[in-house]
Image (cartoon, grey):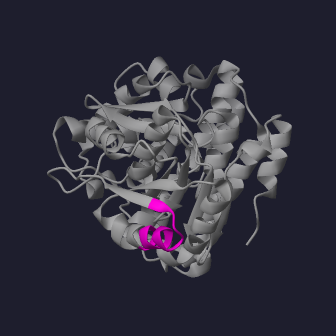
Amino acid sequence: MKDFKAIDQLAKELHEDRSQLPYIEVRKGALQAITPYIGEQGFRHTTIIVDDNTWEAAGERLFHELEKHQIVGEAVLIKSNEHDQVLADEDAIVQVLVETSQQSNALIAVGTGTIHDITRFCSHKMDIPFLSVPTAASVDGYTSKGAPLILRGFKQTIQTASPIAVFADIDIIKKAPREMTAAGFGDILAKNTSLLDWKISHWINDEPYSERAADLTRNSLQMCIDHVEEIAQADDEGIRLLMYALIESGLVMLLLNFSRSASGGEHHLSHYWEMDLLKRNAPQVLHGAKVGVATAVITELYQSYANDEDVFGANTGQIAEEIHNLYKPDQMTQWLQLVGGAATPYELGIDDDLVQKSLNEAFRLRDRCTGLYLINQAKSKEILYPVSKNIEL
């Protein structure tokens, strides 16, 4: 498996200190490397942040490994809500802050995106480092600083802390539920439109752009497409490559210090849907599952407006060419189905009315120039869903 040398090159180009990036191991048996690393760093009192599922997947084993090496360890088991789900909200944050010993000099996030978001926020507020131990290849935020939190019922991303190390054990990750792996694939698939939105914002809004960062992210997407069969089968190599792509995407965001490479209009739709579920106190849907489906929806929308000069102005020609080069919605739907994920909003429990509202309103969630934003600024009537209804025959 290739290493992260390309990240070194990006760090050099951006004049960032590579030594500040996390230490990373992505391999079978990586869990065994955690206690030696903790010993080398001089941490003598650690707190493992888990939920019921991740305690069983890796937390309990790690807890006993720490005990065997005479490292004081404790575990904070995040309480689930009435839907038997753990959310990165005020309740979870307060629980970690209250239950973490004052003697603890390192936190260990054992889990997926939600556990990491809770841990990274608390790590930042407590001013102690944290280690990342993914239990599924489900999200690209393991190495980022951004913590998407639910505060007073609204989704808000706060820049906090990145982990000092990541230990991704393929033996553990490949055993994750299939829908978790499908979510990770969906989060990578989002780069189909996020990279375009970043380029659009650069051309139209003169926002900073790094060709090397874009190429790294694009290559990670292509790598996962090329190995979608292995990912679908939870093959060791397929899971390793997906995990590599997710981590690399997070490292790119970390070096850029913003998320443009990985998050565009498709993420706005996903966040809009998530906030609707929160308002209705409905069970949440995995982030990557929503994002993957939203990517197909956004791609179809962009295709329908590709040649509209009222939307893209003097940049219409080059943007239309970029849109033409995107993966097609039906291709993405097939890939999502192959890896075991939802392929349509309906399969996520998202109805057409909500999708249509999100197409017309989700651009307001962030002050960010995207194709979705530009279409909404130029539209003369409401965007309809299914998107095919917008096309006048």
Residue 389 on image: x %, y %: 35, 39
Magenta span has 71? yes
Q: Quadrant of the N terminus?
A: bottom right
Q: Nearer the viewer, residue 15 or 330?
A: 15
- The residue under the point 34% across, 25% down is 382
- Is residue 113 something one can see in this rendering? yes
Residue 318 on image: x %, y %: 72, 34
Q: Nearer the viewer, residue 143 or 358?
A: 143
Splitting the image into 4 quarters, where does residue 320 fall?
Answer: top right
Whether residue 8 sits left or right of residue 272 in the image: it is right
- Is residue 228 something one can see in this rendering? no
Q: Nearer the viewer, residue 211 or 286?
A: 286
- The residue under the point 44% across, 46% down is 119
Residue 270 on image: x %, y %: 38, 42
- The residue under the point 45% across, 45% down is 103
Majority secondary structure of the magenta segment? helix
The residue segment tinted magenta is 61-72
Splitting the image into 4 quarters, where does residue 238 fall?
Answer: bottom right
